[in-house]
């Protein structure tokens, strides 16, 4: 195949390189500091600030192949995947961009040359048609007079509802900002008919496929429908790799191109599937791509935000696997094939192969029980339906009680052409929401703050400050005063109290007026305001009082030591484990540090020691900590550490400990690293798949931990009577001696079991062609009973063994060979024993165990038990 997806990528980039474009790499699927985007969904995303005028372009002509995800918001193709031949959650966008260089004419000429030239894609010109914005006469004339398209191949798209620039062929970045007309190129899958006139309604059907969109950004939209012309108009184009590949490979579906064809083959081969369920195979082959690329971009399945989308995609693929009869874990097994067939785009997958496989496997194992139970109930319920409409309350029951996702029920129903009673479902969800609000009434209560100036935080430079009380709340209601001993919340105009933020706990302390004292037990941020939670410990405090607010300095200084240690720990982890390690959360208290990070295996002791040593090395160097403000753009350029899931303002605060650590941070810190004194890791454990948690301490707490360890060592020295520094060699000797003793004991035990078994073996009697042993033992170790039985079974291929051990209680063990269980069963014999002797126990047809109380009555009945069982054996 000449036109493989890999060759199409190379041809596209080679074409634009020859047109003097700089080849730009694909950006991450996560656009940092852009709250409007969940994932990168177009080639222009990484150049958004250039289009908006916030940044100047480094290069005027760029070409790229951008990895994109469309699973939410305006561009959400998730629910269409599997049901159309052209939609994907993950796709590759081929694009070329001009920032004040060429404009309409060259853009169109480039596109036409690449698509139709024999040297490049060589598509039949007669199979192509275009759309243009009705009022964009310039673009119409380029297609008509320069390219030479006939009138019936140029479709003019009008404004909707006669509102100017309200057209499918007029592109807008948002409510306001850069915008302009666009022209789209379509491919006709039907028979060539040069004279056929096509209108805008027909072009949306399955016969025509949009392959390239060229956007001419020439205006800046302002409020009140004002469109001003841009001095340097730009071009943004996008062509889906999968769509152009389907045309060049002469297939009628994206899922028949080489990448998907090979992945679908692999799905069938791995799972030995003969059923050719097109929808499910398409869903799985699409979702393995998006799942793998999202994990490679450090997204981990969770119940919120981006992690929720990833979990949804994985689970949707798994449910479609079950639909086509795959019962075992399968999704992770597709990763090697995906890497193989993705070609140059799969480099990031190759680097993260093990990580992707581990996450996918773990997620499928966790979801399997929920899925199996939910599907079983769903199938049974849908079989009973008479009107092809599933009750909404049943859908809610699956979701609320069993944890079976609603969207998966919707997928299942869509597959079976069933409808869901959405009205009832919405009612049930509303009830659940109301109930949750009642359960969390305290958490969800909010303080209403009027239009006043925001609280000014002065805690970076001051531990105490003179302030004015702006508002007082009691039980979340605005009041004019608060008196002893009531609890409440206070908002000041200025405060030295740090509010809980960025993992750092809030300050505690005292707010004091002439007439009262308020003890602050917690400080939190609410919008632009800092709220001081606590209670009056004497007198009263009123609205507009002048107060002196003072934090607990001792506690703050310990917090500052720990916060700086967290920055050092973050850098140490990256240096020792690799730059792929990402901070996933932290908790900075006065008495400990908690740091969550992405890593997929436990830290070995030698790695923990290396991390500690590196942190302590920079503590000993007593490096000065510099704190300064900069533009977020500059911070990104300098590779300063930031959190990918956090939205930053235009101006950011940098905490710098050169050359070891530079991070964006709003927290409080010490002035020199030496004040930390010492850093010690207490533990490293897994908190969820792929996320680990380090707990650590500094300063006095670290010394306290070391002293406790020393005390343990001293106790060991005392026990082993060795006060020298040779404890380890002494302990090794003890362990070697112990292991020798254990081996010796095993030999003695083996011999003992053999001798006991030999004695019992002689008690064997032959009843009705069956070997039968009934033996009473006294004060035998119950652990040995099964070993004795195993030894006895080696002598006989078929036997019934009943051993009774009289110790503090009476213990029964019944073992029956498998070939005899059709005639007699161990659990039934136990029931017979309990009819004679009071006791309890259980088991199965091969092995059963029970226990009875040690009484004279029970001991007298043992002989009766033997006689009863012998009589039963004679009859069977």
Image (spheres, rainbow, N blue to C red):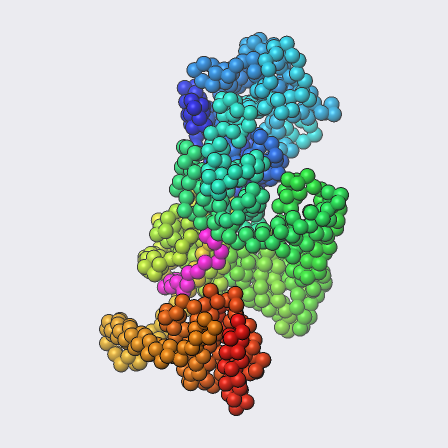
Q: Is residue 206 left or right of residue 644?
A: right
Q: Nearer the viewer, residue 22 or 10?
A: 10
Q: Total of numbered circles in the picture?
A: 0
Q: Is residue 218 visible?
A: no
Q: Which residue appears at 56% of the width and 54% of the height? A: 369
- Residue that appears at 68% across and 58% down: 436
Magenta stretch: helix, strand or loop mostly? strand
Outermost residue, bottom direction?
856
Res 75 → quadrant:
top right
Q: Residue at x 41, y 73 (%)?
A: 789
Left or right of 477 on screen, residue 730: left
- Image coords of residue 213 (percent x, y): 56, 24
Measured as percent of width and height from the top left, residue 315 is found at: 56, 46
Horizontal side of 794 relative to 809 (left or right) equals left
Image position of 728 (left or right of 575): left
- Along the line of sight, which residue is nearer the eye, 671 or 639? 639
Q: Residue 511's spot in the image, x, y percent? A: 60, 66
Chain part drawn in magenta: 676-690
Residue lying at 48% horizontally and 80% vertically, measured from the top left? 811
| Foreground of the two, 763 or 102 | 763
Q: Is residue 202 above or below residue 85?
A: above
Q: Is residue 851 magenta?
A: no
Q: Is residue 547 above or below residue 83?
A: below
Which quadrant is the N terminus positioned in? Answer: top left
Residue 453 in the image: state x and y as whole percent.
64, 51
Q: Is residue 682 magenta?
A: yes
390 w.r.t. 670: above or below: above
Let me know if residue 828 appears in the view: yes
Q: Which image quadrant for residue 675?
A: bottom left
């Amino acid at each position: 195949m000449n036109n493989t997806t890999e060759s199409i990528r190379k041809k596209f980039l080679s074409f634009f390189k020859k047109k003097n474009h700089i080849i730009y790499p694909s950006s991450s699927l996560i656009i940092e500091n852009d709250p409007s985007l969940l994932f990168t969904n177009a080639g222009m995303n990484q150049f958004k600030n250039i289009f908006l005028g916030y940044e100047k372009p480094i290069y005027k002509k760029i070409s790229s192949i951008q990895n994109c995800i469309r699973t939410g918001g305006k561009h959400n193709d998730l629910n269409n995947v599997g049901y159309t031949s052209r939609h994907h959650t993950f796709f590759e966008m081929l694009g070329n961009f001009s920032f004040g260089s060429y404009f309409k004419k060259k853009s169109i000429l480039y596109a036409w040359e690449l698509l139709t030239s024999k040297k490049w894609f060589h598509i039949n010109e007669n199979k192509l048609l275009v759309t243009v914005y009705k009022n964009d006469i310039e673009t119409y004339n380029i297609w008509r007079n320069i390219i030479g398209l006939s009138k019936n191949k140029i479709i003019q798209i009008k404004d909707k509802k006669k509102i100017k620039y309200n057209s499918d062929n007029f592109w807008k970045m948002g409510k306001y900002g850069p915008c302009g007309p666009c022209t789209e190129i379509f491919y006709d899958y039907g028979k060539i008919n040069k004279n056929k006139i096509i209108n805008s309604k027909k072009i949306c059907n399955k016969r025509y496929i949009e392959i390239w969109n060229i956007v001419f950004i020439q205006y800046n939209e302002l409020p009140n429908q004002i469109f001003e012309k841009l001095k340097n108009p730009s071009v943004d184009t996008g062509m889906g790799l999968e769509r152009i590949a389907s045309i060049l490979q002469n297939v009628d579906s994206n899922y028949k191109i080489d990448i998907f064809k090979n992945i679908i083959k692999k799905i069938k081969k791995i799972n030995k599937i003969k059923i050719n369920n097109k929808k499910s195979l398409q869903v799985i082959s699409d979702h393995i791509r998006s799942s793998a690329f999202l994990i490679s971009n450090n997204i981990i399945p969770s119940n919120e935000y981006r992690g929720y989308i990833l979990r949804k995609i994985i689970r949707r693929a798994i449910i479609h696997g079950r639909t086509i009869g795959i019962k075992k874990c399968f999704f992770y097994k597709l990763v090697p094939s995906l890497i193989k067939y993705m070609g140059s785009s799969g480099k990031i997958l190759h680097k993260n192969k093990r990580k992707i496989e581990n996450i996918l496997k773990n997620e499928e194992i966790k979801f399997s029980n929920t899925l199996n139970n939910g599907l079983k109930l769903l199938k049974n319920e849908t079989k009973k339906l008479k009107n092809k409409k599933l009750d909404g309350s049943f859908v809610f029951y699956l979701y609320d009680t069993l944890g079976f996702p609603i969207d998966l029920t919707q997928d299942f129903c869509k597959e079976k052409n069933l409808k869901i009673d959405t009205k009832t479902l919405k009612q049930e969800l509303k009830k659940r929401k109301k109930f949750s609000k009642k359960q969390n009434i305290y958490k969800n209560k909010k303080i209403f703050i009027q239009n006043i100036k925001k609280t000014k935080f002065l805690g970076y430079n001051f531990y105490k400050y003179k302030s004015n009380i702006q508002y007082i709340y009691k039980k979340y209601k605005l009041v004019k005063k608060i008196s002893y001993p009531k609890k409440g919340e206070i908002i000041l105009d200025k405060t030295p109290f740090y509010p809980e933020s960025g993992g750092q706990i809030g300050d505690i302390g005292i707010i004091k007026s002439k007439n009262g004292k308020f003890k602050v037990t917690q400080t939190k941020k609410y919008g632009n305001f800092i709220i001081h939670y606590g209670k009056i410990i004497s007198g009263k405090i009123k609205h507009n009082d002048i107060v002196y607010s003072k934090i607990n300095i001792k506690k703050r200084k310990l917090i500052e030591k720990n916060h700086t240690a967290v920055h050092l720990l973050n850098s140490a982890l990256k240096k020792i484990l690799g730059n792929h390690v990402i901070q996933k959360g932290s908790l900075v208290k006065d008495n400990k540090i908690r740091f969550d990070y992405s890593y997929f295996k436990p830290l070995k002791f030698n790695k923990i020691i290396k991390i500690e040593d590196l942190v302590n090395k920079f503590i000993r160097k007593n490096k000065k900590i510099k704190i300064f403000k900069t533009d977020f753009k500059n911070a990104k350029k300098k590779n300063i550490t930031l959190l990918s899931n956090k939205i930053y303002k235009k101006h950011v605060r940098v905490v710098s400990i050169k050359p070891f650590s530079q991070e964006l941070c709003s927290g409080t810190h010490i002035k020199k690293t030496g004040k930390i004194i010492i850093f010690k890791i207490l533990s490293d454990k897994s908190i969820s798949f792929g996320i680990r948690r380090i707990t650590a301490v500094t300063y006095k707490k670290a010394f306290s931990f070391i002293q406790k360890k020393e005390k343990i060592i001293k106790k060991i020295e005392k026990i082993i009577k060795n006060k020298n520094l040779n404890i380890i060699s002494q302990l090794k000797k003890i362990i070697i001696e112990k292991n020798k003793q254990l081996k010796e004991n095993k030999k003695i035990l083996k011999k003992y079991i053999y001798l006991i078994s030999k004695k019992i073996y002689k008690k064997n009697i032959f009843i009705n062609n069956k070997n039968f042993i009934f033996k009473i033992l006294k004060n035998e170790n119950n652990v040995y009973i099964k070993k004795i039985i195993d030894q006895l079974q080696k002598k006989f291929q078929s036997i019934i063994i009943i051993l009774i051990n009289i110790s503090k209680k009476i213990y029964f063990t019944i073992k029956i060979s498998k070939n005899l269980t059709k005639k007699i069963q161990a659990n039934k014999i136990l029931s017979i024993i309990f009819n004679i002797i009071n006791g309890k126990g259980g088991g199965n047809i091969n092995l059963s165990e029970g226990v009875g109380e040690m009484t004279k009555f029970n001991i007298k009945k043992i002989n009766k038990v033997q006689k009863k069982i012998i009589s039963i054996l004679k009859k069977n």
